């Protein structure tokens, strides 16, 4: 991962970055820009040069705007003017991401930062730099120069050490979630996922890991996980990862859907819809990575994470449309669509959390429905909860982290569509409002925690078709950033 140093005196000035901002924020995109006074005076005549360039290049200072000036034979050899917009955390995150991409062929840059910079702005800049520099490739990258070092030039570096460390942990855990999700399913079996969690957890103290295999799942009655995983040669697993600091006052359970590949089962998907189904465990990746991050940051909240893992494959042992599944705790589901498998494994995990863990708060993250993208587009998750305060707190955390969610209705009159003639529930109603109905189905397994439960349908924002600000093409790691912010605020 990109190395970031906090320094008070520059010792390497190959490339110098100077911030600029809109001279008149009310003028919007047509505003002219002005240089921002930095904590350390830039060398030689670069300040005057920057002021002249701002006008000559007609910069407006919007966040992420970049102008490069070559200076052959002088120091620095390149001068980059970086737009920082309104100077808030989100603007600095956008600026950092743009800089990481614009300077990708450099090896080292120094950023001269304003003297009045806030910790939030430094966090935004650091996260933007680290997240946008992420790449996932299974081939050799070649000898092309890559940015591997950034110096942040500040008047008091020690003030921001904790902020940068938090941002680095957040980015590292987001990278982990992206890596897990991007990994092809020829490698990513349920047991492979378990191995990755085991390895990552081994480096952190005070984490307890339990993994249930098929025999234990059968003995304890996890019928949904067993049904979905029954068609694969790679058997299902249930990961239970527990972070329990001594000073914790609140217990949060996080549940993440972990379908390591989804063919749709006997209700098989068309090829275009199946191609990216390695991402169908992005919810599990997010909650596991966030829990590891919370342990690394020593957050004072107890977290138990449940990741039900299975491959939904086609074979003679695959579960069939019309089967009745008995979940953990005894509730039964009639399923007529084996491609609505995620809710079946989540139902087991939610029921187990309610009956055995008795947390204060219960959250689940899942790449659950295509209806998420139909309703909200490709960048926004659908949030469901009957708890107004919990919903508001999570929405505030997503906004602060630069992720996006929108609260959706849980219409009680739709619950009648879940009725089955032969089972307690019908898992996949076809009356429309697919994301809402999936949430209503999951609600049936929350028991006495119904008023302290929150569900996020994150199928859409879990994957990006192209680079966008700090989001890199492919798996986005959506959920890790806001979870760590929210968990840090849980009382």
Image (spheres, rainbow, N blue to C red):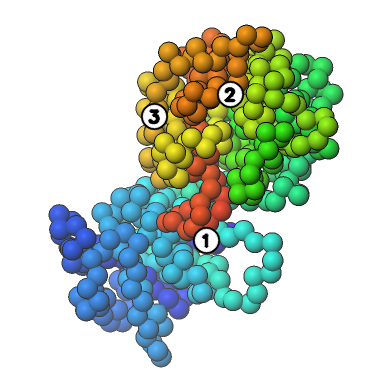
491 left or right of 26 in image: right
Badge 1 is on which residue? 133
Question: In which quadrant of the rendered view does residue 252 lie?
Answer: top right
Mark 3 or mark 2, earlier in chain: 3
Identify which residue is drawn at 46% across, 40% down.
373
Badge 3 is on which residue? 407
Residue 204, position in %: x, y? Answer: 67, 40
Residue 186, position in %: x, y? Answer: 76, 49
Q: What secondary structure is found at the residue carrying circle 3?
A: strand
| Tag in front: 2 or 1 | 2
Would you say residue 304 is visible in this rendering?
no
Residue 122, position in %: x, y? Answer: 39, 53
Quadrant location of the N terminus in the rendered image:
bottom right
Question: In which quadrant of the rendered view does residue 404 lie?
Answer: top left
Mark 3 or mark 1, earlier in chain: 1
- Residue 81: assigned label: none
- Residue 428: assigned label: 2
Q: What secondary structure is found at the residue carrying circle 1?
A: loop
């Amino acid at each position: 991962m990109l190395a970031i140093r906090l320094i008070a005196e520059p010792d390497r000035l190959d490339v110098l970055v100077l911030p600029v901002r809109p001279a008149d924020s009310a003028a919007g995109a047509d505003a002219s820009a002005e240089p921002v006074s930095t904590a350390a005076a830039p060398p030689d005549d670069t300040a005057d040069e920057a002021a002249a360039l701002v006008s000559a290049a007609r910069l407006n200072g919007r966040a992420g705007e970049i102008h490069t000036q070559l200076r052959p034979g002088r120091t620095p050899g390149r001068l980059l003017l970086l737009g920082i917009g309104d100077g808030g955390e989100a603007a600095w995150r956008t600026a950092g991401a743009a800089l990481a991409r614009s300077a990708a062929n450099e090896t080292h840059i120094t950023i001269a930062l304003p003297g009045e910079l806030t910790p939030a702005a430094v966090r935004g800049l650091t996260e933007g730099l680290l997240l946008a520099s992420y790449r996932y490739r299974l081939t050799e990258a070649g000898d092309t120069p890559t940015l591997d070092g950034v110096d942040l030039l500040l008047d008091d570096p020690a003030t921001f050490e904790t902020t940068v460390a938090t941002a680095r942990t957040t980015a590292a855990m987001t990278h982990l979630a992206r890596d897990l999700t991007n990994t092809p399913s020829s490698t990513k079996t349920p047991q492979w996922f378990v191995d990755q969690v085991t390895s990552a957890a081994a480096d952190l103290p005070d984490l307890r890991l339990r993994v249930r295999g098929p025999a234990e799942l059968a003995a304890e009655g996890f019928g949904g996980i067993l049904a979905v995983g029954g068609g694969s040669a790679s058997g299902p697993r249930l990961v239970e990862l527990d972070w329990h600091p001594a000073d914790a006052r609140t217990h949060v359970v996080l549940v993440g859907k972990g379908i390591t590949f989804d063919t749709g089962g006997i209700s098989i998907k068309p090829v275009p819809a199946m191609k990216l189904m390695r991402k169908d465990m992005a919810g599990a990746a997010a909650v596991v990575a966030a829990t590891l991050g919370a342990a690394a940051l020593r957050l004072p909240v107890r977290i138990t994470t449940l990741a039900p893992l299975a491959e939904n494959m086609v074979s003679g042992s695959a579960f069939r449309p019309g089967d009745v599944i008995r979940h953990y705790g005894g509730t039964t589901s009639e399923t007529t669509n084996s491609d609505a498998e995620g809710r079946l494994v989540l139902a087991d995990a939610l029921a187990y959390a309610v009956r055995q863990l008795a947390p204060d708060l219960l959250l689940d993250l899942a790449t659950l429905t295509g209806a998420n993208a139909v309703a909200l587009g490709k960048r926004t998750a659908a949030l469901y909860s009957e708890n107004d305060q919990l919903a508001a707190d999570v929405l505030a955390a997503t906004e602060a982290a630069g992720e996006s969610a929108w609260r959706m209705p849980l219409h009680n009159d739709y619950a009648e569509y879940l009725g089955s003639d032969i089972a307690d529930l019908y898992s996949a109603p076809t009356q429309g409002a697919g994301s809402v109905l999936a949430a209503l189905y999951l609600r049936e397994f929350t028991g006495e925690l119904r008023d302290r439960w929150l569900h996020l349908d994150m199928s859409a924002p879990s994957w990006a078709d192209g680079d966008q600000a700090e989001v890199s093409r492919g798996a986005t790691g959506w959920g890790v950033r806001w979870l760590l912010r929210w968990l840090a605020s849980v009382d």
